[in-house]
Image: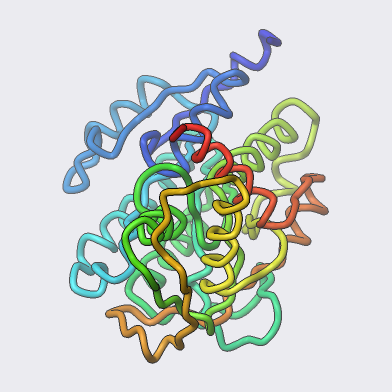
Amino acid sequence: MDKKELLIKVLLLGSSGQVGFELNNSLKPFFNLKLVNRSDINLQDFERLDSIIEKFSPDVIINAIAYTDVDKAESDSNEAFRVNADLVQHLAEMAKLKDALLLHYSTDYVFDGYFGGSYTEESRVNPLSVYGKSKLLGEESIIRSGCKYLIFRTCWVYSERRKNFLLTMINAFRTKEFINVVDDQIGTPTSSNLISELTLNCLKKIFYQDTSLNEVIGIYNMTAKGETSWHGFAVSIFERLKSLGYKDMKTNSINQISSDEYLLPAKRPKNSKLSTAKIIETFGTDILNWEHYSNDLLEKIVANTE
């Protein structure tokens, strides 16, 4: 381990979440890492957070805290905006004050999904839900603050922790003879492990490989490659589990349904495809098709159940 690497101080907020947990594992061999969980922060009063930042004096602040319950946000908008906008604005102001790089994760939900192709970082934003609006306001707060920042827009995030589509499907396969899954929403399943590895790559390029920070500040799409529907993702999970000899499955039918047949409080974008050309060109990242990452995780999950 290069001693220089431990001189770079990284404050990681949300270290117990889906993305934060993987970030902790990826970053700790390379940086002086301090972890802060959401329970450590009073969202009504940022005094404790300010004290942590003052004392640690980070070079990088990574915000992996987010209100991610898309449907609950429709009736709990105050909390969604408090976490996804107010907290982010405060972090941006502190980053500006301390001359720290702020790294923040956003979402495909800032788009309305009516565009036919893949969204770039310059595509017009028009969120349909409270969640999407709160995340967009967070982005805008960062940009207005004048701090140094990297905003990473992700899509359909899953992991072996917390609540996500992949784990929901595995549980459904165990308990239901048939399941209905939406087939008219398109996006890219993206593992939290990929997000953490791409984040590490970007930080190493900036701090250890002479990439100019001022030249790379901005918004980047951060997803796996390829695309599928929620139904396609479900079928892929099912087939991979079968190929691995996973026997604890009751399901024998995965039915395609439309979004109109599966009504939820929050409206989703029907097209969540994000172009990753910018992050690949800027940071020289190596990104594979989404099935590569989901298959690897399923193999790990099955191995842990044996």
Q: Is residue 131 left or right of residue 199?
A: left
Residue 226 in the image, given as x and y percentages of width and height: 71, 65
Of 182 and 125, the residue lying toward us? 182
Of 153 and 143, the residue lying toward us? 153
Residue 214 in the image, given as x and y percentages of width and height: 71, 45
Residue 90 visible from this viewpoint: no
Residue sitting at 27 percent across and 80 percent down? 265
Residue 38 visible from this viewpoint: yes
Residue 280 in the image, given as x and y percentages of width and height: 78, 52
Of 154 and 254, the residue lying toward us? 254
Q: Is residue 50 left or right of residue 282?
A: left
Where 283 falls versus 145 (above or below)? above
Residue sitting at 75 percent across and 50 percent down? 287
* Quadrant occupied by the N terminus: top right
Residue sitting at 66 percent across and 50 percent down? 217
Where 158 falls versus 261 (above or below)? above
Where 242 falls versus 55 (above or below)? below
Q: Is residue 131 left or right of residue 9?
A: left
For the view shown, which residue lies furthest in the bottom direction?
260
Q: Quadrant of residue 187?
A: bottom right
Of 248 and 97, the residue lying toward us? 248
Where 110 falls versus 63 (above or below)? below
Residue 51 in the image, given as x and y percentages of width and height: 28, 27
Q: Quadrant of residue 289?
A: bottom right
Colour scheme shown: rainbow
